[in-house]
Amino acid sequence: DAGVTQSPTHLIKTRGQQVTLRCSPKSGHDTVSWYQQALGQGPQFIFQYYEEEERQRGNFPDRFSGHQFPNYSSELNVNALLLGDSALYLCASSSTGVYGTSGSMQYFGPGTRLTVL
Amino acid sequence: AQTVTQSQPEMSVQEAETVTLSCTYDTSESNYYLFWYKQPPSRQMILVIRQEAYKQQNATENRFSVNFQKAAKSFSLKISDSQLGDTAMYFCASFREETSGSRLTFGEGTQLTVNP
């Protein structure tokens, strides 16, 4: 049973560029959440996708956008990269039940380390 | 909004001894979950233990147990018989769920070092 996978593992970009990170959820999961973890800090919630729509969003600018595909995989896009966007980006998957709740269990992928120069 | 506070940036313990990591949280939710996650140098986020707020009994998972004080909004993690492999960053997190979605709110973390 494959767990949550993310690609790429590492990425180096320069300021102003755009980046796309990818996540495949754990088998049987239909909900994907994205978190940003700056060095030495706890992860911060970016947004969550379910049924190909953004359900909730944290306090991140519109430069951060996402997408979910019919197979439940997801992409995180960041435009106009800033130095401060350098971080580990974590994807977490969960299963949303018929009442729209996920039962709290989120499984994390290994993350993508983004460096902006 | 939910907030989670970990007041111990770093802690150390001798192998085989017991250590307790502190966490306080603030929430207006009536039902919620609390978690401890471990993040070793590989940076993979690993679930250590989960507590459901409506359950009074403290969760236990092998050498890991929690002291959940709902009225005080305190959620500490006790690690017994510490092992070298327990060296990691530990994050306390609260989970909020609504029909519009869910999210985890993390604390700033406690770096635990187990010394031989």
Image (cartoon, rainbow, N blue to C red):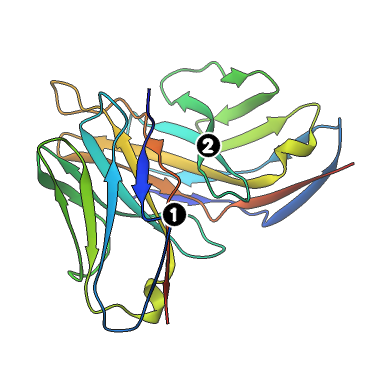
Q: Is residue A49 above or below residue A104?
A: below
Q: Is residue B72 above or below residue A28?
A: below
Could you say where residue B101 lies in the image, as x and y percent from the top left? Answer: 20, 39
Quick one: quadrant of the C terminus of chain B?
top right
CB atoms of marks 1 and 2 within 8 Å:
no
Classify residue A108 by image quadrant: top left
Could you say where residue A16 lies in the image, as x and y percent from the top left? Answer: 27, 83
Distance in Å between CA atoms under marks 1 and 2: 13 Å
Kind of residue sitting beneath label 2: Ile
Q: Nearer the viewer, residue B107 or B85?
A: B85
Q: Chain of mark 1?
A: A
Same chain check for tags 1 and 2? no
Q: Secondary structure at mark 1?
A: loop
Q: In this orientation, does residue A99 appear?
A: yes
Q: Secondary structure at mark 2?
A: strand
Classify residue A51 by image quadrant: top left
Front label number (1 vs 2): 2
Q: Is residue B106 left or right of residue A81?
A: right
Name the residue tied to disc 2.
B46
Q: Chain of mark 2?
A: B
Q: Residue at x 34, y 80 (%)?
A: A82
Q: Is residue B1 left or right of residue A9?
A: left
Q: Which mark is residue A43?
A: 1
Kind of residue sitting beneath label 1: Pro
Could you say where residue A6 lies in the image, as x and y percent from the top left? Answer: 36, 47
Q: Residue at x 42, y 82 (%)?
A: A117
Q: Is residue A75 above or below residue B37?
A: below
Q: Is residue A2 above or below residue B12?
A: above
Q: Is residue A63 left or right of residue B54?
A: left
Could you say where residue A31 lies in the image, as x and y percent from the top left? Answer: 22, 36
Number of marks present in the image shown: 2
Crowding around mark 2 (Cα neighbors within 10 Å: few <14, some 14 to 19, many 20+) is some
